[in-house]
Image: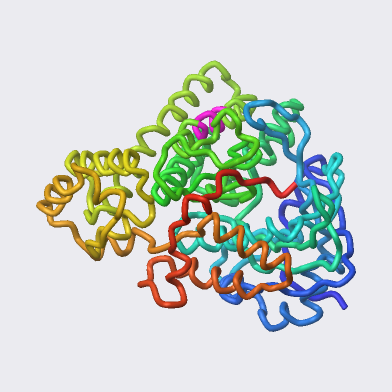
Amino acid sequence: MTLPLPFDTSYARLPEQMFAFVAPTPVSKPAFIQFNDALAERLGLDKETLQSPDGLVLLSGNQVDGTHPPLAQAYAGHQFGNWNPQLGDGRAVLLGEVVAPDGQRFDMQLKGSGRTPFSRSGDGRAWLGPVLREYIVSEAMHALGIPTTRALAAVTTGDPVYRDAILPGAILTRVASSHIRVGTFQYFAARQDREALQALTDHVTARHYPSAGTVADLLRMIVERQAKLIAKWIGVGFVHGVMNTDNMTVSGETIDFGPCAFLDEYNVAKVFSSIDRQGRYAYGNQPRIAVWNLAQLATALIPLEDNQDAAVEEFTLIINGFGGIYDAERRKIFAAKLGFSAADDATERLSNELLTLMADSEADFTQTFAALSTDASVAPLDRHASYEDWKARWRALRPDETVMQGTNPQLIPRNHLLEQIIQSGVAGDFEPFRNMLAAVTAPFSQLTDATRPFAAIPLREERVTQTFCGT
């Protein structure tokens, strides 16, 4: 039987060149790894029914809603700065959109569900490792208060996936306020398809920015959301790893957790992705790359304006405004990490000095800030001659412990521990995955015997120096 869901797929009502209807490829033996009860409640869905055999059939892609056929979205993108005019959902399908009880609309997408017309040479499948990684990291980001796509369910397929080895297959049910990307706009601008570009712009405006009266307003609002998002990434030491324009949503949500990682030791030049050989997407480069990506969005929107010369001038000013928004948000975040509810020159000076000391001593990013509220020892910093002087000047400003505790997580998804839980999952043991998920979704709670292992700094030989895309 088909599980009835309250889908209303507005994207399917857009011009037909914007997507392709495609059914997921059936799998042989699906089984649940994890289901997100809290997210199901947020969406207004029946969590018991979704976890039933009928729900498993839907969330594995073995049966779909005939009233709202799944679709794969078309988009293009700059990948490491190189233009690719034809990308699209090559291993994902949009099952449909649900409207939550508060009226907010969400996409429900199956990721790893088989080939689509946009798959190129790929098999459209996902192996277990990237599914476990995205589930944990996206839910951790949500718990950290960072806009993100989320995980509703993860299932194994019972089918092998062929990469550099034969690996177990899996499917992630991903939820987002939408999956529309900068690259979606680029796709139609490059084809000089003004009709589709206008329809897409109207759709995004109505769905995400209803107060935007003009294209310039829309761009300005997207820039603001992205600037604040990147500042939040910087504030928790997050490195996205592959900030291509097809991996930047116009809704302002973090998306695509392939080669992402969190800093252990503080280093602005830190790169994890195995394919980022030039450091384009290093931790400290992320604000600059966001500006570059947004400039591509602005370029794609120019054809919608009657006076394009004036639009270029106005859009350039809007893009240049990213820096001020980002700096203000970053200053506020780092002031709070030091225990101050407002940022000023003194808090900015203190945070910059501390970051310099951390870089010099290779201090752990997360543990350093978590230790401030308890005056705990930070071994590399304690050996630095200037640290005691810094702490004396910091304490003189009377930081608020409550502000720090609400801003500085006790733990984040450690790269070396993610690798360990993936290996356990491949061996068929998902208990470490569930334990880590419970820990990272309560990041501001005091550590317990159960969660303390997930806050552990890796030994030097345990540090993960490279992360990989799931494809």
Q: Estimate the x, y position of residue 221 in percent, counting from the top left.
A: 47, 41
Residue shown at 76%/63% (left/top)?
170
Magenta segment main secondary structure: helix
Q: Estimate the x, y position of residue 146 in percent, counting from the top left.
A: 47, 55
Identify the residue at the far left of this view.
396
**Is residue 428 something that shows in the picture?**
yes
Magenta range is 289-295
Q: Estimate the x, y position of residue 97 in percent, counting from the top left.
A: 69, 61
Left or right position of 133 against 448? right
Identify the residue at the far front of this view.
461
Task: Give 323 or 375, whichever is nearer the viewer.
Answer: 375
**Is residue 105 something that shows in the picture?**
no
Left or right position of 364 against 389? right
Task: Give 219 or 379, whichever is nearer the viewer.
Answer: 379
Q: Look at the picture and state if 340 lies above or below 402.
A: above
Left or right position of 333 against 126? left
Residue shown at 86%/68% (left/top)?
62
Q: Look at the picture and state if 288 lies above or below 112.
A: above
Left or right position of 434 against 24? left
The N terminus - image quarter: bottom right
Count all numbered tags in the image, as a single digit.
0
Queried whether the magenta region covers residue 285, the answer comes back as no
Q: Estimate the x, y position of residue 329 in percent, counting from the top left.
A: 35, 44
Task: Give 62 or 14, whichever is nearer the viewer.
Answer: 62
Task: Give 26 or 396, whichever is nearer the viewer.
Answer: 396
Queried whether the magenta region covers residue 293, the answer comes back as yes
Residue shown at 66%/32% (left/top)?
79
Residue shown at 26%/44% (left/top)?
354
